[in-house]
Image: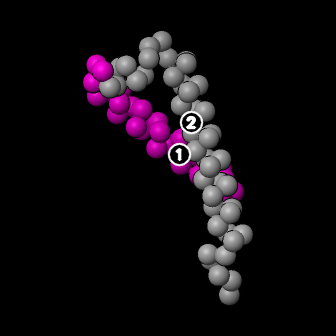
Amino acid sequence: MKNILDAQHLVGAVVYSALGAAVFFGWFVIFDKLTPYDLWQEVVVKQNRALATVMAGLSVAMGMIIAASMLG
């Protein structure tokens, strides 16, 4: 039985986590550019809770899609 915490598994986990975070960040930047308003301004300054809820749902969905695509 292989040790789960060996160097190969640890490096793979770190690389895939970084790749997933980069893809997620890229998706968020593209989504922010496609919307007609500044998402940060709407959510933080104007406290638009409806938009924050939609963004949270989209973020969870995109995270699940990215994770599933990386697991194969």
Q: Residue at x 28, y 19 (%)?
A: 46
What whole-number distance in Å separates the C-alpha atoms at marks 1 and 2? 10 Å
Residue identifier under label 1: 63
Within the magenta stretch, is there residue 60? yes
Part of the protein shown in magenta: 45-72
- The disc at residue 25 is 2
The x and y percentages for residue 50 are 31, 27
Looking at the picture, which amino acid does disc 2 mark?
Answer: Phe
- The disc at residue 16 is none
Picture quadrant where residue 57 is located: top left
Residue toward you, 64 or 14: 14
Residue toward you, 63 or 43: 43
The x and y percentages for residue 37 are 44, 14
Q: Quadrant of the C terminus?
A: bottom right
Please identify the residue farthest to the right as the structure is shown.
8
Q: Residue at x 27, y 24 (%)?
A: 47
Image position of 49 (left or right of 59): left
